[in-house]
Amino acid sequence: MQQVYLDNAATSRMRKEAFDAMLPYFMDEYANPSSIHAMSREPRAAVKKARAQIAGCLNADPSEIFFTSGGTESDNWALVSGAEMREKKGRHIIVSAIEHHAILETARYLERRGFEVTRVGVDGDGIVKLDELEKAIRPDTTLVSVMAANNEIGTIQPIEEISKILKGKDILFHTDAVQAFGHIPLDVKALGVDMLSASGHKFGGPKGVGFLYVRKGVKLVPFMHGGEQEEGRRAGTTNVPGIVGMGVAAEIACSGLEASMARTAELRDHLIERVLSEIPYSRLNGHRTSRLPSNADFSFEFIEGESMLMSLGTKGVCVSTGSACASGSLDPSHVLLGIGLPHEIAHGSIRMSIPEDATMEQIDYAADCLKQTVETMRSLSPLYDDFVKSRKVRGCTTENTATR
Ligand SMILES: *Cc1c(COP(=O)(O)O)cnc(C)c1O
């Protein structure tokens, strides 16, 4: 049986070049880059190179890149330290309602510590309501965090427009770009953000390493206390192999961005086209065009997402219901509820995220399996049977709710 991996938003396979580049730093060049002796020189140079590779992807200065243990740490750091740094000005922060849990749970933690949080809603496509965001700004607002691209429905947010709204207001602007970095072009100067989070394993680098971009001039208290690593802002012995692997993965991802975007978008569009035209009562979630090239997220009426995931699994097709962190819980995804889906439809949703080396044959196989699965499951559903009968009586056709 073939395996088709369509869960690239949960984690990606490492690039061979990144893996190879890491190897020397485990056994040969294992010295601590913070040491003074001769052996520390090579690992120090390697970390410096990775910092430049990542900065180059973002139009940032290498001194603005701070290595962390991943996206979660970068998000926690940006929010907690950003809010604490500016406590004298105020204790109000704004996030979008469809952020990753790394942001939403950190915001909840800040609330328990006496901060106030406004969660700004999104429209039916998952785009943050800019007028709502503007109205939420108060004199005591110190920080706004809106993700660059959503991990479940793939919607890309109008980050530049948000930074225009915030301009001149002395409010820190952070973006969680974990799904965006290495997948769509990002230029921190054009975006106008003060801080940006990313994670190695989401773009062909290793797990357990990431970074936070902090614009020059933005003061941010350390989140990890200890040594003087990362200019004294992020303590902890430098993860040299991880950083080297992430740097190489970033450089390759960014230099081949146009080609890989075109390739995955073609696969994605083929999948979307097939699903919406061949499976009745199906719906594409997220914005049709302002969307990650690799993301296709669907809802199917009269279907339970978890059972669909299991059934696809027996056919070798690996997909996800919402975010991996939310799987296993029975609550429907906050993102799908956020775009206004009723509970029962949100429950029948799956996310397919396409690696850039997937083939058209794999996509067709996945679409065939999906169609088969939905048909089988619906054939067993008395609800679906009644529904179809009642539609026939009324003379309706099988129309997709996504058509607009
Ligand atoms: C995966 C992800 C994170 C968490 O990153 P880790 O490196 O796995 O901790 C944060 N935000 C978004 C949008 C993500 O997709």
Image (tube, rainbow, N blue to C red):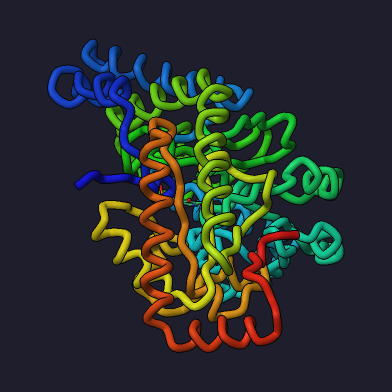
- Please give the name of the residue rendered at 81% of the width and 66% of the height, measured from the top-left corner: 136
* In the image, residue 64 above or below residue 327: above
- Please give the name of the residue rendered at 53% of the width and 88% of the height, measured from the top-left corner: 386
Q: Would you identify the image quadrant in which residue 167 lies?
A: top right
* In the image, residue 5 above or below residue 280: above
Residue 98 x, y percent position in the rendering:
61, 63
Residue farthest toward the left in the current orientation of the protein: 27
Q: Is residue 340 left or right of residue 387?
A: right
Residue 249 x, y percent position in the rendering:
40, 26
- Please give the name of the residue rendered at 72% of the width and 67% of the height, measured from the top-left corner: 121
Q: Is residue 275 visible?
A: yes
Q: Is residue 272 left or right of residue 238?
A: right
Q: Is residue 51 left or right of residue 213?
A: left
Q: Would you identify the image quadrant in which residue 61 lies?
A: top right
Q: Is residue 385 left or right of residue 339?
A: left
Q: How many labels does the image show?
A: 0
Residue 123 x, y percent position in the rendering:
74, 63
* In the image, residue 242 above or below residue 143: above
Residue 287 x, y percent position in the rendering:
68, 52
Please state which of residues 276 and 67 is positioned toward the viewer in this rendering. Answer: 276
* In the image, residue 342 above or below residue 262: below
Please state which of residues 312 and 325 is positioned toward the viewer in this rendering. Answer: 312
Q: Is residue 80 visible?
A: no
Q: In which quarter of the image is the C terminus?
A: bottom right
- Please give the name of the residue rendered at 48% of the width and 20% of the height, measured from the top-left corner: 53
Please state which of residues 107 and 198 is positioned toward the viewer in this rendering. Answer: 198
